[in-house]
Image: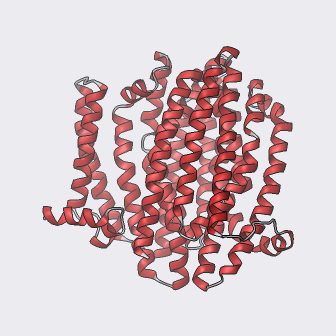
């Protein structure tokens, strides 16, 4: 079990990292091609799209993985095929209806957002909803069987196809204006989902031999209650922050237009939701990968009543989230201007200044979001779906209220401060819920503090590099060297127990290195 968890976590982390690197390679030239205004238009469409995906299929991979894992533990292997067939029928039907609805309502949604030009972008991305629904079913089956490679492969394929097709269309269509460019980039998203669906279907067929994947209308009805029982609470919880982003997409530009022109308001929103959010989400996605890997294992441990294994995996996952989040938060806080100017040369000096301010404010949310992702995954894996929903709802309402207040007083920076406050609230509540379920763990608190301390020391060297106005290359070199020293210090400090180290990717090698330093 320990090796299985290590392998799952390793595969998901490596694949997620590669996918995010590819995503950054996509977002950076895309931002430079579209400009801040074009990226603002692009990012106005995505919150609506993300909310629809969350509603239609967001919780299905997790719900199906939990059910499949539990059926394996109980020996009910035939039940898993019925679940896949029922889920596929339900999701494809819902996905098709939502795709059509988005096309029909595209003009209305764009008008409500204050940007009529968004209509064509919604039409371009609408087909992807259907195929993402099918992808969700396959991912759930693979993850429930502890087969993380297909899900990891799908993330890479999706990122690569989106990079190639999206950028190609954005540059080829540049002569026709930014609206057509944005639509071309979004069409690349749809193409990537079609290709990913086909690849996962082929892998699933090979895994199941000659058995047909037919849509089971009768079995679907019998499975709905079971699927909904798990997926509905998770879906509600998963919808909360996409819903706040959805509200932001309607609220931010319209409020900013009261004091700014439409193009400048859209550009400000584009800087925050594009470059800044992309950088913030890169390290957070690694914690999400750990969460995806840990959920099926926690579900199985729960069925086996293996409390020791549950505590080990939970403790390890939380401390790894801190280990990942701290250095990135410090890097973004200390050198925001240098990072943005290096990666996003297409931004104007005013946009760069705004982006640096927003990245500095948002930097701590890397750690907060990482912890929130892990705690949510742990609670869901242990069948406590109620607490994450309540905690996320409180944070979501906080974000909307604070955004409304601050947008009128300090402009776009109000959205960043609102996110920081909201994620702080959610993280504190999620950690409290986790400790309430498993008992307060002083080891996690103490050793997380040690990790944060070493991160602070790392930040001093970076601050000196920025203070002496070193070039971005030297700052990055110092960041890498400081990061390696930070990781070595954490290992030597015994912030992770030997069992926790062994449960990490390359754990045996890390433990061997630790032994040499003692």
What residue sits 63% from the left and 80% below the top?
71
Residue 362 left/right relative to 49: left
The C terminus, quarter of image? bottom left
Left or right of 107 in this view: 243? left
The furthest residue to the top = 175
Q: Where is 38 relative to 499, above or below?
A: above
Q: Quadrant of residue 166?
A: top right
Q: Is residue 173 above or below residue 395?
A: above
Residue 76, horizontal then vertical, whole percent: 66, 83
Q: Is residue 19 left or right of residue 477?
A: right
What colour scheme has been applied to the protein in the rendered image? secondary structure
State the image quarter where residue 441 is shown.
bottom left
Q: Residue at x 38, y 43 (%)?
A: 329
Name the quarter where the N terminus is drawn.
Answer: bottom left
Instruction: Identify the image quadrant of residue 36.
Output: top right
**What residue is drawn where x is 63% and y is 67%?**
141
Q: Position of residue 225 (x, y in %)?
A: 78, 73
Tell me if residue 258 can be seen.
no
From this viewpoint, is residue 413 visible? Answer: yes
The image position of residue 173, as x and y in percent, is 67, 20
The image shows residue 387 at horizontal and vertical percentages of 59, 66
Q: Nearer the viewer, residue 275 or 67?
A: 67
Which residue is farthest front? 210
Question: Could you tell whether 118 is left or right of 288 in the image?
Answer: right
Depth check: 113 or 76 in front?
76
Q: Residue at x 55, y 41 (%)?
A: 160
């Amino acid at each position: 079990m320990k090796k299985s968890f290590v392998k799952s976590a390793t595969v998901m982390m490596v694949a997620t990292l590669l996918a995010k690197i590819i995503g950054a390679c996509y977002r950076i030239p895309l931002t430079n091609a579209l400009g801040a205004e074009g990226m603002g238009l692009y990012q106005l469409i995505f919150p609506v799209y993300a909310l629809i995906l969350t509603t239609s299929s967001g919780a299905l991979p997790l719900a199906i993985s939990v059910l499949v894992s539990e059926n394996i533990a109980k020996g009910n292997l035939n039940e898993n095929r019925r679940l896949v067939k029922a889920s596929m029928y339900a999701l494809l039907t819902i996905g098709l209806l939502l795709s059509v609805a988005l096309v029909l309502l595209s003009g209305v949604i764009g008008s409500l957002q204050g940007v009529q030009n968004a209509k064509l972008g919604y039409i371009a991305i609408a087909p992807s909803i259907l195929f993402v629904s099918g992808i969700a079913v396959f991912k759930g089956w693979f993850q429930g069987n502890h087969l993380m490679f297909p899900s990891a492969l799908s993330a890479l394929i999706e990122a690569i196809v989106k990079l190639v097709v999206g950028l190609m269309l954005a540059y080829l269509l540049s002569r026709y204006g930014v609206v057509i460019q944005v639509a071309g980039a979004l069409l690349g998203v749809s193409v990537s989902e079609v290709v990913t669906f086909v690849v996962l279907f082929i892998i699933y067929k090979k895994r199941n031999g000659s058995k047909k994947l037919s849509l089971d209308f009768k079995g679907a009805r019998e499975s709905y209650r079971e699927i909904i029982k798990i997926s509905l609470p998770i879906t509600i919880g998963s919808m909360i922050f996409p819903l706040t982003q959805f509200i932001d997409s309607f609220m931010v530009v319209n409020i900013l237009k009261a004091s700014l022109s439409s193009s400048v308001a859209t550009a400000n929103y584009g800087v925050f939701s594009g470059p800044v959010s992309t950088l913030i989400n890169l390290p957070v996605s690694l914690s999400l990968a750990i969460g995806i890997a840990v959920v099926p294992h926690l579900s199985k441990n729960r069925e086996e009543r293996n409390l020791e294994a549950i505590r080990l995996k939970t403790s390890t996952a939380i401390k790894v989230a801190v280990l990942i989040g701290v250095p990135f938060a410090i890097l973004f806080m200390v050198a925001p201007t240098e990072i943005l100017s290096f990666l996003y040369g297409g931004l104007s000096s005013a946009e760069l200044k705004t982006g640096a301010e927003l990245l500095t404010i948002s930097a701590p949310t890397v750690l907060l979001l990482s912890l929130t992702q892990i705690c949510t995954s742990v609670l869901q894996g242990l069948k406590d779906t109620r607490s994450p929903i309540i905690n996320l709802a409180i944070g979501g309402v906080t974000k909307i209220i604070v955004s409304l207040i601050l947008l009128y007083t300090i402009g776009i920076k109000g959205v960043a401060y609102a996110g920081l406050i909201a994620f702080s609230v959610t993280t504190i509540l999620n950690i409290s819920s986790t400790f309430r379920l498993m008992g307060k763990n002083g080891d996690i608190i103490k050793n997380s503090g040690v990790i944060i301390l070493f991160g602070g020391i790392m930040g001093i060297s970076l601050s000196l590099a920025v203070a002496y106005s070193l070039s971005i290359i030297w700052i990055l070199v110092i960041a890498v060297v400081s990061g390696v020293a930070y990781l070595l210090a954490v290992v030597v400090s015994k912030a992770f127990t030997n069992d926790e180290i062994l449960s990490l990717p390359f754990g045996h090698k890390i433990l061997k290195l630790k032994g040499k330093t003692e």
